[in-house]
Image (tube, rainbow, N blue to C red):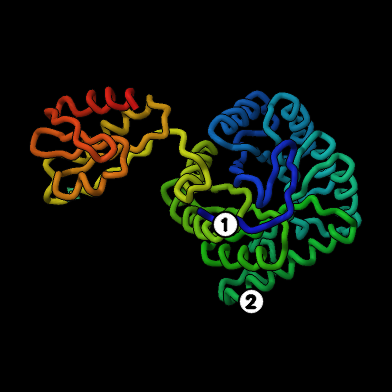
């Protein structure tokens, strides 16, 4: 069981973020914000997929106007993603953003930051202060050593935090991102040691889903296993539903999120396999799509190691030549021909 880091608890709409609350998955819409119908549809899809917060970019005045309408049409708290413009931040806050994401490094004028803080206070809007490695001038060179990089990012974070705390604003969530796995892990460890605000975790960009999964899983997984991280976003160049699915898998693997659907365990197969394990596993996976229970199902290639390794599965099939031995919670219950493996598993699943 992971012991989460103790932090302040920050409310984003009705969602609590911080040590006492479950880790929250978020993602971003990837359709034009001004296309209100598509944006609302995607927010709702993300909420169904497991996002409890959804972020929307608002680069123009037309976007914040659309944002105001989208807020009215969805039940999930929305985060406005602001990059450079203090005016956009204030418009988004007034439009009903539950949180705004700011990179104060991009907003040079201190007075502007104070105006954003005043608006956020008035509307009870939380603020995520994001420090991105790429936006710190001295870190653009690749040969800056990791210790110096993280120290500079921490210094930036301290500077921004002072702006908010000196203005008596503490409804804050912190994030420090890089595209690099080790640097992101290191800077977030330092932030976790230095501050008691909740932390949002993510990489700035990680590639197509097949390339993004591993860096995101290592970065987020390492930090979450150490108790660091209160809200996460997986970045992948594809549908945000895929990002959400990956985020959910990371949390399930760490025991931070309850499984609601079947888990399929498959042996890696070897020369002992009595059957085409991969083909059978694909068929079982397809059959399990219609099941809505958190059951563990194992497909093992032989009876040499299969029964022992699948002992903790609710249901297992251990294959032999042209047949399968079916196990329920480690006990053999039947032997069936290969063609009956899937129907037997489905029948037994219904009984669980
Ligand atoms: S369960 Fe059997 S077939 Fe599968 S990897 Fe283990 S020994 Fe090989």
Q: Is residue 311 left or right of residue 250?
A: left
Give percent across and percent down for residue 239.
52, 37
Total marks in image: 2
Q: Nearer the viewer, mark 2 or mark 1?
A: 1
Residue matched to label 2: 148
Q: Quadrant of residue 99?
A: top right
Does residue 161 appear in the picture of this structure?
Answer: yes
Residue visible at 52% across and 58% down in the picture: 225
Q: Image point 70% across, 67% down: which residue?
A: 194
* Label 2 residue SS: helix
Could you say which quadrant of the image residue 12 lies in? top right
Q: Give percent across and percent down for residue 314.
A: 32, 36
Residue nearest the viewer, comparing 233 with 50: 50
Q: Residue furthest left?
A: 321
Q: Residue at x 74, y 30 (%)?
A: 71
Q: Is residue 88 above or below residue 286?
A: below
Examine the rendering and report whether any part of residue 238 can be seen.
Answer: no
- Frontmost residue, 326 versus 99: 326
Residue bearing mark 1 = 3
Residue contact between numbered discs 2 and 1, judged by CB atoms under 8 Å = no
Q: Earlier in the sequence, mark 2 or mark 1?
A: 1
Q: Is residue 133 above or below residue 171?
A: below
Q: Position of residue 168 (x, y in %)?
A: 89, 56
């Amino acid at each position: 069981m992971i012991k989460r880091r103790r932090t302040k608890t920050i409310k984003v709409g009705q969602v609590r973020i911080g040590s006492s609350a479950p880790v929250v998955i978020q993602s971003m819409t990837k359709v034009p914000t001004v296309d209100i119908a598509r944006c609302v549809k995607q927010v709702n899809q993300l909420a169904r997929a497991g996002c409890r917060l959804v972020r929307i970019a608002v680069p123009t005045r037309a976007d914040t106007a659309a944002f105001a309408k989208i807020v009215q049409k969805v039940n999930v708290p929305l985060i406005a993603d602001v990059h450079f413009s203090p005016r956009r931040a204030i418009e988004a806050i007034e439009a009903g953003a539950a949180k705004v994401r700011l990179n104060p490094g991009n907003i040079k004028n201190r007075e502007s930051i104070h105006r954003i803080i005043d608006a956020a206070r008035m509307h009870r809007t939380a603020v995520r202060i994001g420090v991105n490695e790429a936006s710190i001038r001295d870190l653009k060179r690749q040969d800056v050593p990791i210790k110096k990089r993280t120290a500079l990012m921490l210094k930036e974070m301290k500077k921004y935090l002072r702006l908010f705390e000196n203005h008596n604003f503490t409804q804050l969530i912190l994030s420090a991102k890089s595209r690099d796995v080790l640097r992101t892990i290191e800077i977030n460890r330092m932030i976790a040691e230095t501050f008691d605000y909740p932390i949002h975790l993510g990489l700035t960009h990680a590639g197509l889903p097949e390339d993004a999964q591993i860096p995101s899983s290592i970065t987020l997984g390492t930090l979450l296993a150490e108790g660091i991280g209160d809200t996460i976003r997986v970045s992948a160049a594809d549908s945000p539903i895929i990002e959400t699915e990956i985020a959910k898998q990371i949390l399930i693997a760490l025991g931070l999120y309850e499984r609601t659907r079947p888990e399929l365990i498959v042996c890696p197969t070897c020369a002992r396999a009595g059957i085409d394990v991969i083909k059978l596993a694909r068929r079982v996976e397809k059959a399990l799509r219609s099941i809505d229970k958190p059951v563990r199902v194992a497909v093992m290639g032989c009876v040499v190691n299969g029964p022992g390794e699948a002992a903790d599965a609710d249901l297992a099939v251990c294959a032999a030549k042209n047949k399968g031995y079916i196990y329920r919670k480690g006990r053999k219950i039947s032997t069936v021909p290969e063609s009956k493996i899937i129907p037997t598993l489905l029948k037994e699943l219904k009984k669980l």
